[in-house]
Image (cartoon, rainbow, N blue to C red):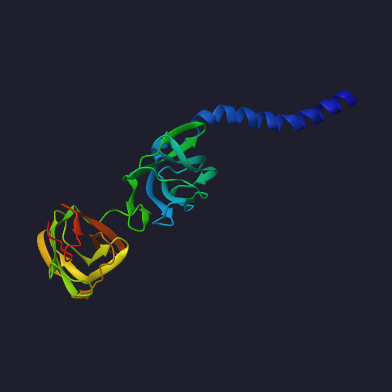
Amino acid sequence: MKKSFFFLVALLILYPNFVQSQTDKSFGIFLPRISHNDLRIIQLEMRPDPVREGQLISFQITISNQSYHSVKVSLFIKDGERTVSSIHDVYLYPGYNQIIFPESNYRFTRDENCFTVEVDIERTKRVVDAVRKFCARRSYYGWTLSPQLVGPTFVEELEMFPDPAHPGQEIRFRVRLRNEGHSLRGDIRINDRDQIVVELRDVFIPSGYSEYYFPYTRYFFQRSDHCFTVFVNLQKTPYKIDSIREFCARPLGWTLRP
């Protein structure tokens, strides 16, 4: 009698667990599963942006889960085969998900560094499709993921009046630009290394050729080499304009003439 009683109690305890286990195994093949094709990278951002050499950076992604189910994954920011940052055991819910990665001491080593996102679902890793390429480029203030708004644009000519100029004399510059991209509006400035020589505010730069006269400025030539560069400032971001040649003032009465 006692043996029958204990057998009945054990059966009552173990049977529900056994049934649940068999149910999971039986119906597991019918449960919907999320594939890598259900995911899409909508946005990838750096913080800070722009970032200077030696600064710690963190990445934030917006990832779309186009299925109706949640999934726990590990995510990796990759530059080629190199892992830049990673985060583990995060849930991706249906719809849009924002994921912030831990800080990284990543170092930029090329002129352009393009990032991809790799996801690990149940120990299967695959790169997630993205709506566009996310490539960091070098800007005046550091590396940025912001798209380049200028270009291709070139400095065709940079002239100085008077030429030659004497130290301490008031001078003005004329810049001739060739814009092969879309028309734009911004600030144009002339730099001597990191020093701003003169600037024009809020000017229209059409497609094709255009000329700009800068206001007079009393610029002091203090070194043996003064090489000028032209920048266009758009949305608080300066873009260096390529030149067809170097524009350097030589100490022969200080002249820009070749």
Q: Looking at the picture, tell me which residue is in the foreground, 46 or 111.
A: 111
Where's residue 24, x and y in %? Answer: 59, 31
Quadrant (top left/top right/bottom left/bottom right) for the C terminus: bottom left
Q: Is residue 81 at all visible to an observer of this figure?
A: yes
Q: Is residue 106 above or below residue 16?
A: below
Quadrant housing residue 156: bottom left
Where's residue 163, x and y in %? Answer: 12, 67
Where's residue 181, x and y in %? Answer: 16, 54
Point out the residue furthest to the left here.
209
> Residue at coordinates 74% horizontally, 30% vertically from top-left?
14
Quadrant housing residue 167: bottom left
Quadrant (top left/top right/bottom left/bottom right) for the N terminus: top right
Point out the residue furthest to the right here.
2
Q: Is residue 169 above or below residue 104?
A: below
Q: Is residue 129 left or right of residue 82?
A: left
> Residue at coordinates 49% horizontally, 35% vertically from top-left?
121
